[in-house]
Amino acid sequence: MKRVIIFAFLAILNGFGVPNAQAETLDVSPLFSNIGFESGNLNGWKVTRPNNNYVASLSPAVNPSIDPADPANNPTLLSPPNGSFFTGLKRPGDYGPDLSYKLVHEAISVSVPADTKFQVNVFANRGRLEPFDTPGATGTVLVRIFGWTTGGTVPSVNPSNDNWSRTINWNPSAQSFDFAGVPDGTWGQRSFVFDPSADGVNPADLKSLSLSVAAQNHNHDQYIAIDIPIETPLPDSVILGLEDREGADSFLVLEGFKAGRTSRANLDPISF
Ligand SMILES: [Ca+2]
Ligand SMILES: [Ca+2]
């Protein structure tokens, strides 16, 4: 009689060799509203000003008309790498500061297990504006996830100076987007992981969480653009592997996952 074994190898997809025994890496993109600007605006985000190089607003808020420089002067405008909307900032002309923008998401309440790490994927695109084909652009993108262990009112940020209403308790350094291998005028995607435990903070103690992305031009006639993809939570159950062997008995093994979970660490087995 044929023996059929069905396994859900979700742990492998998430990079875990041993389920339940290692830290869970939680993609935060489903947690933050409008993280990929798909509402067609900056709802849920604040444009903050750490210093005067940073703009107070993006105009337009999403989908700016950006024509990256190229030798053929192709007039094709940037399009979003994910969904229908992205953000960006041009710095035309050789006067004034090298304009940057910083998006800080409104803090959210969280409750996560100990050993949780937080991850976010970010698209970035930098280049020169027409007709400045050379030299290569020097824009930078900084990504940061951070949080608070104290309860009470969810903290809020002051857009005029980038200061928060309460002292940040988990305050890791921002991570830089690596543009290596990403030619000017094209979108690259990088994954950023932040580990509270490595910074001496127990993730189980976190009460609030926020996310920021700073996009910086560093010379004239440049642009910088970013987007964030939304990772789709898994359905209630998944079958990702199928093994079909000849054997004495027939049996089926199916592991189920609660909706919204993106790793095996919190699975609820389904028996039947
Ligand atoms: Ca988007
Ligand atoms: Ca062009």
Image (cartoon, rainbow, N blue to C red):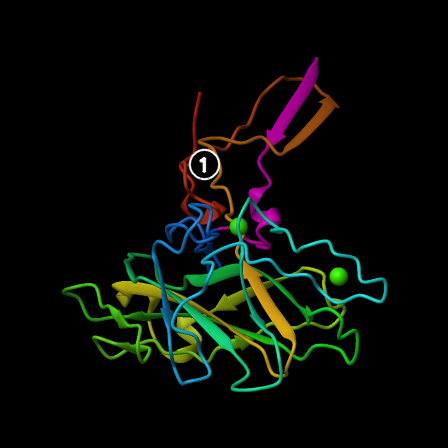
Q: Is residue 12 inside the magenta stretch? A: yes
Q: Is residue 209 above or below residue 221?
A: above
Residue 2 falls in image quadrant: top right
Q: Is residue 12 above or below residue 226?
A: above
Residue under label 1: 257
- Mark 1 within 8 Å of ligand 1, using the beta carbon: no
Residue 183 relative to residue 195: left or right: right
Q: Is residue 116 above or below residue 221?
A: above
Residue drawn 41% across and 41% down?
260
Residue 91, image x and y in percent? 58, 75
Residue 163 relative to residue 243: left or right: left
Residue drawn 54% across and 66% down?
192
Residue 186, image x and y in percent? 72, 61
Residue placed farthest to the top in the image?
1
Residue 171, image x and y in percent? 37, 78
Residue 133, image x and y in percent? 79, 73
* SS for callout 1: loop
Q: Is residue 198 above or below residue 73?
A: below
Q: Quick one: quadrant of the N terminus?
A: top right
Residue drawn 24% across and 68% down?
156
* Amino acid type of the residue that numbered disc 1 sits on in the rendered structure: Phe
Total numbered labels placed on residues in the image? 1
Q: Nearer the viewer, residue 29 or 40?
A: 40
Q: Nearer the viewer, residue 201 or 49?
A: 49
Task: Write down which quadrant ligand 2 falls in.
Answer: bottom right
Density class for disc 1 (Cα within 10 Å; few <14, some 14-19, many ≥20) is many
In this picture, which residue range is highlighted in magenta?
A: 1-19
